Image (spheres, rainbow, N blue to C red):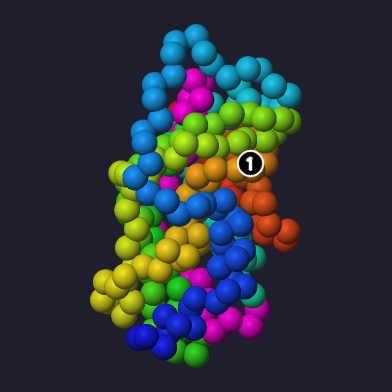
Amino acid sequence: MRNFIGRLILPSLLAAAILLTGCNLTTGSPTPPEVAQGSALPSLPGNYDCLVGEWELNDFADTITSMLPSDITFQYTGTSGRIHWTFTAGGIAEATADNFALTFADKNDPSQVVTVLVNGTTRRFYNTTGPNQITFSNPDNSEFTYSAVVDGVTVSLDPLLKGLVPVMPESGTITYQCQGLSLSVIPPVTGVAPEGFSKVSP
């Protein structure tokens, strides 16, 4: 099992993963204060009005597959559970995970499986900083948990593996495209496929 974990943590993969999520991997930051009524974000170029609402992640397989180098010894095998992103008109963004899991298997021994599981809600400020751009700040991860299971045994999760989970970035800027009930989030990594979301509620 230890050898499998060692093969899993590849520098090239993890560098791409951290760029993808924009995470600084801190937890327990102060909860963003309430935004006063009437202080909604300014109207900027792009589809800001389309962005506001609740979105469910429904297209992530191509994203993670495009992150993985061709010479690695494991492969992505599936996703279960749900992740929702919510953007309010007052500048608060949330990502909520309900037993969301990513599963990987050794290419040479498919019985060797590792699962990364996330649950809870994480919050931060956001602003539309330009045409189809979102900038995040002030993350609060105190209600969000990560765990890892290898061969059926719960193990300590290396912080770098958190970068593989499509959680809302803690800070920095991402690009998005929004049209009707579809949202595409474009990772800041060359050659990585975008994540796709469907609108759940306004």
Question: Vertically, is 119 above or below 198?
Answer: below
Question: Vertically, is 192 above or below 122?
Answer: below
Dominant secondary structure, magenta: strand
Q: Does the image show residue 58?
A: no
The image position of residue 58, as x and y in percent, is 51, 49
The image position of residue 36, as x and y in percent, is 44, 13
The image position of residue 150, as x and y in percent, is 33, 77
Q: Which residues are magenta?
A: 70-92
The image position of residue 107, as x and y in percent, is 51, 85
Q: Quadrant of the N terminus?
A: bottom left
Q: Is residue 70 left or right of residue 18?
A: right
Helix, strand or loop at label 1? It is strand
Q: Is residue 136 left or right of residue 159?
A: right
Is 168 covered by the magenta stretch? no
Residue 70 picture quarter: bottom right
- Residue drawn at the location 55% of the way across and 43% of the way down: 171
- Residue beneath disc 1: 173
- Residue drawn at the location 42% of the way across and 64% of the way down: 159
Question: Vertically, is 14 above or below 88?
Answer: below
Residue type at numbered disc 1: Thr
- Of residues 179 and 9, the one drawn nearer to the viewer in this rendering: 9
- Residue drawn at the location 51% of the way across and 71% of the way down: 76
- Of residues 29 and 13, the one drawn nearer to the viewer in this rendering: 29
- Residue drawn at the location 42% of the way across and 85% of the way down: 4
Total number of numbered discs in the rendering: 1
Q: Does the image show residue 23?
A: yes
